[in-house]
Amino acid sequence: MFRLVISEKTKDPFADSLEILGSYNPHTKDLQVKADRIKHWVKQGAGMSDTVTNLLIDHKIIEGKKTTASKITKKRTEKMDKKAAETKKAADDAKAKAEAASQATAEAAAVPAEEVKEEVKTEEEPQA
């Protein structure tokens, strides 16, 4: 169970808060808030964490776009880019192999057709 509270930035987060705005139970997804007080504090310029913002947007208490609640580190970004490059390379290799196979099949199909035409012509010439 989490509480939604308003407190001053300069004070200890575990100290007394100015006002309790509501609570959220993540197990039951139950959100109990004072919507009018939240809107009041937002108009006064109070800032919210990304998680609280997304939670209030989900329950249509405030309007706006969701924000990213977690940050991706540089190391993780590099790892993801490297994996994406490997996946792209593998896809390009598979595409090249498929094109080569289709060209080989097309060439193989073209050769017997020419041989059949030649055989037909040779049979007609002796009969004439």
Image (tube, helix red, strand yellow):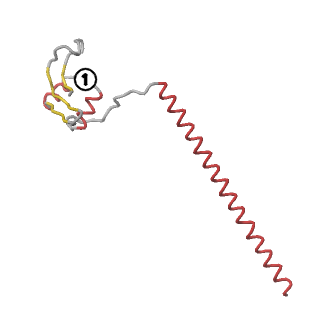
Observer-nearest of 40 and 75: 75
When the figure is inspected, residue 59 is found, relative to residue 77, above or below; the finding is below
Q: Quadrant of the N terminus?
A: top left
Q: Residue at x 18, y 22 (%)?
A: 5
The answer to whether 77 appears left or right of 110 in the picture is left
Can you give x and y, in whole percent of width and height, for residue 16 in the image?
Answer: 16, 15
Q: Is residue 93 left or right of residue 17?
A: right
Give the left or right position of residue 73, taking residue 9 as reference. right
What is the three-letter code of the residue carrying label 1?
Gly
Q: Quadrant of the C terminus?
A: bottom right
Along the viewing direction, whichever of 31 and 122 lies nearer the viewer: 31
Identify the residue under disc 1. 47
Q: Quadrant of residue 127?
A: bottom right
Frontmost residue, 50 versus 101 = 101
Kindly state the secondary structure of the residue where label 1 is placed: loop
Establish if 8 lies above or below 89: above
List x then y, in percent, for residue 28: 21, 36
User: At which x and y percent is residue 96?
Assistant: 64, 49
In this view, which residue lies farthest toward the front? Answer: 27
